[in-house]
Amino acid sequence: MPAVNTQQNERREVILDLLRQQRITRQSELVELLAVRGFPATQSSVSRDLRDLGVAKVGERYLAPQNIGGPATDFGALTGFVTGWSAAGPHLTVVRTSIGAAQSVAVAIDRAGWNEVAGTISGDDTIFVATASARGQQTLLARLTRIFPR
């Protein structure tokens, strides 16, 4: 089974490279481009790859998370997708994004390794960020204010 995982990992790297190099609007485009590069895949496997990689479809275009393969604190490409945030009790922060961008922003937050973040759950345009303490939530809110100015 390791050969399958290796092939899947290589295919996923190619997907990320393709998304960073060109505008891709349909999964069928990715299937075709992968086949040309020697990675035959079905639409359903590409769909799973996109989900597992944290790729967002924003508007008509698929966007690769900028932090995969890059510095964990690089949120530059995501700043335009965060539309707001607010505390929801002492341990939960709600982050709002453009439609389709929540997963990419949540992946970036998770990979940043912030001590105050216990975990994230993302939908299409909303992220719940759990913190272990009220003080941790205040630290998170301060970070969000610096990274995503309103």
Image (spheres, rainbow, N blue to C red):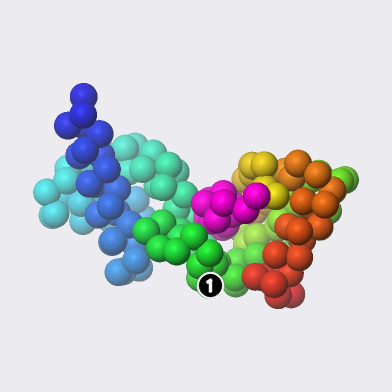
Please identify the quarter of the rendering in which residue 130 is found. top right
- Neighbor class of circle 1 (other Cα within 10 Å; few <14, some 14-19, many 20+) is few
Look at the image and say whether residue 66 sits in the magenta stretch.
Answer: no
Element class at badge 1: helix
Image: 48 above or below 37: above
Q: Amino acid at mark 1?
A: Gly
Q: Residue at x 34, y 62 (%)?
A: 19
Instruction: Name the quadrant of the N terminus.
Output: top left
Image position, residue 100 (x, y; %): 56, 55
111 or 62, nearer to the observer: 111
Please give the range of residues in magenta.
Answer: 101-115
- Left or right of residue 48, residue 146 in this image: right
Q: Nearer the viewer, residue 114 or 80?
A: 114
Q: Nearer the viewer, residue 91 or 42?
A: 91
Instruction: State whether residue 24 appears in this view.
Output: no
Numbered circles on residues, count = 1
Picture quadrant of residue 41 = top left
Residue occupying the point 76% across, 59% down:
139
**Main secondary structure along the magenta-highlighted residues:** helix
**Residue 118: horizontal and vertical position, in percent?**
67, 42
Q: Position of residue 53 (x, y in %)?
A: 41, 47
> In the image, 10: left or right of 98?
left
Q: Nearer the viewer, residue 131 or 124?
A: 131
Q: Is residue 21 visible?
A: yes
Query: In screen coordinates, is 124 left or right of 60?
Result: right
Q: List the residue tagged with mark 1.
A: 76
Q: Residue at x 53, y 64 (%)?
A: 73
* x then y, percent, for residue 123: 62, 45
In the image, residue 106 sits, relative to residue 4, either above or below, namely below
Give the residue furthest to the bottom.
149
> Which residue corresponds to the image point at 25% horizontal and 54% vertical from the top-left?
14
- Residue, far top: 1
